[in-house]
């Protein structure tokens, strides 16, 4: 019985699998006159896929057991689809709420995540808000020189550089012929 304790579980499963394959009669075609040696396919262990975290889920704050969250409330300036002139300065403001239970401190940031920067920086400090407080985020853009639709997407990040809350964006149409 001592020898069986030394046999690994993997070897037992491997032997069982080989026996099952051999019993099934699965053979490769062979040329006439060649020896009839059957070599069953080798079983290969595969790793299970590790689930990735949902990037849009609220994330815990590194300072404790609180949850970061941001709720987009409304566009305060420049409604989606606004027509602007090439090179026009655009001051975009969004109203948001700290809908989590973490304080947003000076280590929190607002970052560009998609579309066109349109003259803005890639990263800003996020406004400091206590849980439940509302505030205004403001970024100044410059409309591109070419006619067309443009989009600039933004996301809040906590002190551990993890995104949280609703993302928000500027969406404009540049056309020198039209202006509202």
Image: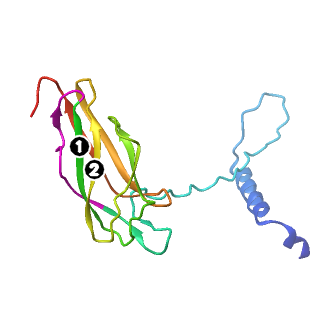
Q: Is residue 122 above or below residue 85?
A: below
Rounded to the nearest angstrom, the CA distance separating label 1 from label 2 is 7 Å
Q: Residue at x 22, y 24 (%)?
A: 147
Q: Quadrant of the C terminus?
A: top left
Give the magenta-colored segment's residue range: 71-87
Name the residue tied to disc 2: 138
Badge 2 marks a residue whose secondary structure is strand
Q: Which mark is residue 166?
A: none
Q: How many marks?
A: 2
Specify whether 113 is left or right of 72. right
> Between residues 80 and 23, which one lies in front from this camera angle?
80
Q: Is residue 40 above or below residue 54?
A: above
Q: Residue at x 41, y 64 (%)?
A: 105
User: Percent from the top left, x then y, of residue 153?
Assistant: 33, 44
Query: Does 130 lie within the magenta span?
Result: no
User: Percent from the top left, x then y, of residue 36?
Assistant: 82, 38
> Is disc 1 in contact with disc 2, using a CB cutoff of under 8 Å?
yes
Q: Residue at x 75, y 56 (%)?
A: 19
Query: Does 84 lie within the magenta span?
Result: yes
Q: Which mark is residue 91?
A: 1
């Amino acid at each position: 019985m001592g020898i069986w304790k030394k046999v690994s579980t993997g070897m037992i499963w491997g032997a069982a699998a080989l026996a099952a394959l051999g019993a099934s009669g699965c053979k490769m075609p062979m040329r006439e006159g060649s020896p009839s040696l059957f070599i069953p396919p080798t079983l290969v262990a595969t790793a299970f896929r590790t689930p990735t975290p949902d990037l849009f889920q609220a994330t815990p704050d590194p300072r404790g057991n609180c949850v970061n969250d941001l709720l987009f409330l409304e566009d305060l300036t420049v409604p989606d689809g606004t027509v602007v002139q090439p090179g026009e300065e655009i001051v975009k403001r969004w109203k948001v709420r700290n809908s989590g239970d973490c304080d947003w401190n000076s280590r929190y940031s607002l970052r560009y995540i998609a579309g066109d920067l349109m003259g803005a920086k890639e990263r800003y400090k996020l406004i400091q808000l206590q849980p439940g407080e509302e505030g205004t985020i403001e970024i100044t853009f410059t409309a591109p020189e070419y006619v067309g639709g443009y989009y600039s997407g933004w996301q809040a990040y906590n002190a551990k550089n993890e995104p949280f809350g609703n993302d928000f964006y500027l969406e404009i149409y540049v056309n020198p012929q039209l202006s509202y």
